[in-house]
Each structure stands twice: as structure tokens, then as C-alpha cells.
Amino acid sequence: MYEEVLNLNFVGPITIRERPLSSYKILPGDVLNLAVIADSDPSLTLQYKWMFTDLQGNQKEIHSNEFWKISWPKNNLTIDVRQVSDPGVVFSLTGDYSVKIFHNHDQKIISITVETDIVTTGPFSCFMKFFV
């Protein structure tokens, strides 16, 4: 009699343990920490990719800079406008943020909206009327 042994390795889904709220407001002088804690099969390494879409619909991958800090292993994004007095700078950081958490067999996406109550007289002032 013929017997075949089938060895299946089950990879469990990515589980989100902690995530940011879906919406935040920022003002000059604020620091906003968006933390994500996730886990999955221990044999797989989770990766994180942070994206930003501004109010005009332009999307880009986030890299650490003067206002954005990505913490190792890229599961935390800090928006830091403590040293900012220009409302236009704060307004330029408002929009839709997302983080894709993934490995070879699964992915999850978390979306966060960041808004502000400030009114700017700079180049974004015409847009502020619709978002305040």
C-alpha cells in the first residue's frame, strides 16, 4: 500500500497588538508618536513601510528627516513640530499616513489621518478653507 506524507507548514496571520488611533490633530509645538506593534510567525521577519499622502493626493514613502523620525525597526513614526512656528509647515504635514506591515506570506495596512486646526496665510491657505 502506498502512503504519502504531506508536510504542510502553516504560517499564521500578522496580528496587530497595538496601533495608533485613526485620526489625530497637530499644532506647532506638538510631537505625535504613531506606534505599531505586530507579530507573526517567529520564522518570518516583519517589515514596515510608512507612506504619506498630502492633501493634493501626492503619495511618497516616508524617510526620516527634520520633521519625521522613523524608529528602528521602523514600526514607530514620530511627527515632531516642537521647533516649528510656521503654520504652513505644520499644514504641509497633514494628510493621510499609512504603514504596511508585511512578510512573504501576509500583509496588513494601517491608515491614520493627521489634521490641524490652524489657519495659514501661506500657499496652502486656499485649501485650509475646506479642511478646517
Image (cartoon, grey):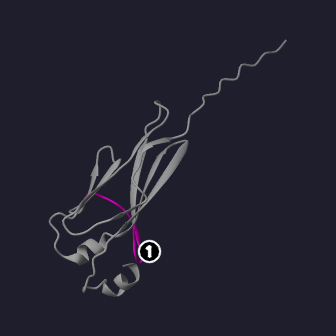
Pick the front one: 74 or 80: 80
Residue 65 position within the rendered picture, expressed as x and y whole percent measured from the top left: 23, 61
Is residue 60 one of those drawn in magenta?
A: yes
Q: Which residue is mark 1?
A: 57
- Identify the magenta region: 53-64
Q: Is residue 98 left or right of residue 76?
A: right
Q: Is residue 75 above or below residue 21?
A: above
Q: Residue at x 52, y 47 (%)?
A: 107
Q: What SS does tag 1 mark?
A: loop
Pick the front one: 89 or 18: 18
Disc 1 residue type? Gly
Q: Residue at x 60, y 28 (%)?
A: 9
Q: Which image quadrant is residue 8 in?
A: top right
**Quarter of the figure with the N terminus:** top right
Pick the front one: 16 or 8: 16
Is residue 55 one of those drawn in magenta?
A: yes
Residue 35 position within the rendered picture, expressed as x and y whole percent measured from the top left: 34, 49
Which residue in the rendered view is the most extreme toward the right? 1
Q: Is residue 104 left or right of residue 97?
A: right
Residue 30 position within the rendered picture, expressed as x and y whole percent measured from the top left: 22, 63
